[in-house]
């Protein structure tokens, strides 16, 4: 081969390389997660769910030649400083083209960082804070969308659910007294304040109203003494940390009252049952955006089985949710074509309408929250028995019926 021919071949190869689309690039997906700190069980589940979706796509050959890499920013204790540090590190990577979280800061201030950076972002958890940020001017937040529907149902539907149990003769409410315990964070306080308003409107008497500092709580006995001094029909704890909720239940059962016990979110985390064992039998909780495991939604069982096969443990709320969120991004990227065209990706995310583990996911353009209701993502009520979570409401999806809690018999 002559030198000229060699040069021509080399030049042709260079021109071809420059002309080719950057289809073989590794696209980075950023995950904000509390890998360390009091919510580490959730954070590790975030990572597993997101990684499962990334691994699955890469194993299938990627998307239009692209492969994907999950990069995690540890938000630790979810303080503003730690969240900001993780957000800035991930946003500073030029190969970062999508970000997600189950929850990061709880008041969701990082949404403004994502809007400024024009970074597609899907989050869950504290949806009221998301709505408060986005709803006044949704056109400024094309970046950001919430897997979780409005929290309004959390605030209102426990009272209605309990009163329906009484109307159906499954429980008795002789006093209509309720004790509500909460944690000093945006998620727990928002829900507990909404509950207190709803119960008051329905004629209930609030006998205990306690707020504990956010973080690890190991001794609930002083609060439980107040509950035992004026026995309520219903005891509610909205502290979402599974370790705290497990301690509360274990110490309640040292000297239980004949009160219905409802614990917000925490029983959905596998760690809760590990910490309580048989004592968790009968516990009630509800979820927005959790797995809707019902014959009417086979997607939930399908994804749950994938998660268990990959990691040897069952997913709680967030493992399967973040798997689905990553796949929402993949669907959007298929429509947009170019991962660096963030505007097109965000537009495609906004147009999402698909069946997921939590039900039908479609976003409200006015708030950017997932739409809530039995035809979309319903509020689901569960009861634990023998370590299994039994879906007892809404009736359209229920696979089991409410059973009396053992300590109330």
Image (cartoon, rainbow, N blue to C red):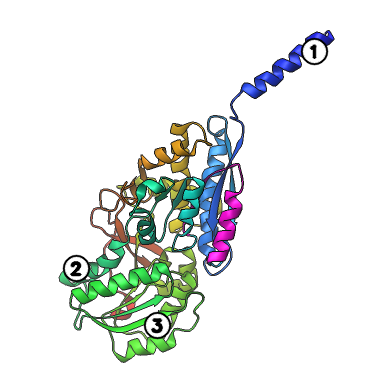
> Which contiguous range is marked in magenta?
80-103
Q: Please state the horizontal and vertical placement of residue 9, each as a whole percent of the image.
A: 74, 14
Question: What SS does tag 2 mark?
Answer: helix
Q: Is the C-beta separation of discs 3 and 2 under 8 Å?
A: no
Tell me: 64 left or right of 137: right
Image vertical order of residue 321 relative to residue 278, above or below: above
How many residues crowd around disc 2 within 10 Å: few (fewer than 14), some, or many (20 or more)? Answer: few
User: If you read the primary sequence from the N terminus, does the residue marked by circle 1 or circle 2 appear first?
Assistant: 1
Q: CA distance from mark 1 to mark 2?
A: 83 Å
> What residue lies at 32% left-to-right and 58% top-to-bottom?
150
> Which residue bears the numbered disc 2?
164
> Which residue bears the numbered disc 3?
252
**Can residue 315 be seen by looking at this rendering?**
no
User: If you read the primary sequence from the N terminus, does the residue marked by circle 3 or circle 1 appear first?
Assistant: 1
Question: What SS does tag 1 mark?
Answer: helix
**Can residue 306 be seen by looking at this rendering?**
yes
> Which residue bears the numbered disc 1?
6
Task: Look at discs 3 and 1 and give the one toward the viewer.
Answer: 1
């Amino acid at each position: 081969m002559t030198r000229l021919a060699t040069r021509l071949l080399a030049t042709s190869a260079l021109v071809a390389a420059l002309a080719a689309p950057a289809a073989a690039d590794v696209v980075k997906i950023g995950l904000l997660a509390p890998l360390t700190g009091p919510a580490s069980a959730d954070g590790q589940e975030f990572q597993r769910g997101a990684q499962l979706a990334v691994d699955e796509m890469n194993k299938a050959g990627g998307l239009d030649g692209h492969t994907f890499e999950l990069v995690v920013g540890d938000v630790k204790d979810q303080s503003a400083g730690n969240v900001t540090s993780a957000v800035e590190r991930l946003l500073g990577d030029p190969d970062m083209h999508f970000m997600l979280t189950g929850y990061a800061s709880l008041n969701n201030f990082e949404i403004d960082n994502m809007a400024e950076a024009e970074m597609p972002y899907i989050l869950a958890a504290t949806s009221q804070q998301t709505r408060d940020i986005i709803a006044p001017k949704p056109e400024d937040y094309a970046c950001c969308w919430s897997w979780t529907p409005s929290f309004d149902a959390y605030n209102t539907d426990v009272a209605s659910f309990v009163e329906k149990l009484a109307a159906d003769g499954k429980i008795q409410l002789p006093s209509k007294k309720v004790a509500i315990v909460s944690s000093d964070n945006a998620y727990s306080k928002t829900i507990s304040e909404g509950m207190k308003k709803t119960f008051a409107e329905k004629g209930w008497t609030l006998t205990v109203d306690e707020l504990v500092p956010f973080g690890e709580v190991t001794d609930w006995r002083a609060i439980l003494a107040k509950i035992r001094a004026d026995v309520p029909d219903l005891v509610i704890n909205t502290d979402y940390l599974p370790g705290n909720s497990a301690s509360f239940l274990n110490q309640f059962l040292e000297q239980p009252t004949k009160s219905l016990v409802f614990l917000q979110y925490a029983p959905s985390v596998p760690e809760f049952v590990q910490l309580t064992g048989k004592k968790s039998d009968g516990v009630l909780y509800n979820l927005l955006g959790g797995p809707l495991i019902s014959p009417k939604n086979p997607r939930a069982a399908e994804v749950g089985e994938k998660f268990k096969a990959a990691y040897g443990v069952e997913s709680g709320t967030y493992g399967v949710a973040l798997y689905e969120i990553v796949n929402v991004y993949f669907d959007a990227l298929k429509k947009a074509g170019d991962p660096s065209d963030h505007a097109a990706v965000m537009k495609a995310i906004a147009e999402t309408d698909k069946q997921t583990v939590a039900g039908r996911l479609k976003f409200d353009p006015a708030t950017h929250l997932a739409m809530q209701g039995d035809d979309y993502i319903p509020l689901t009520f569960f009861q634990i028995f023998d370590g299994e979570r039994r879906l007892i409401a809404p009736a359209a999806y229920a696979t089991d019926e409410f059973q009396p809690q053992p300590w109330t018999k």
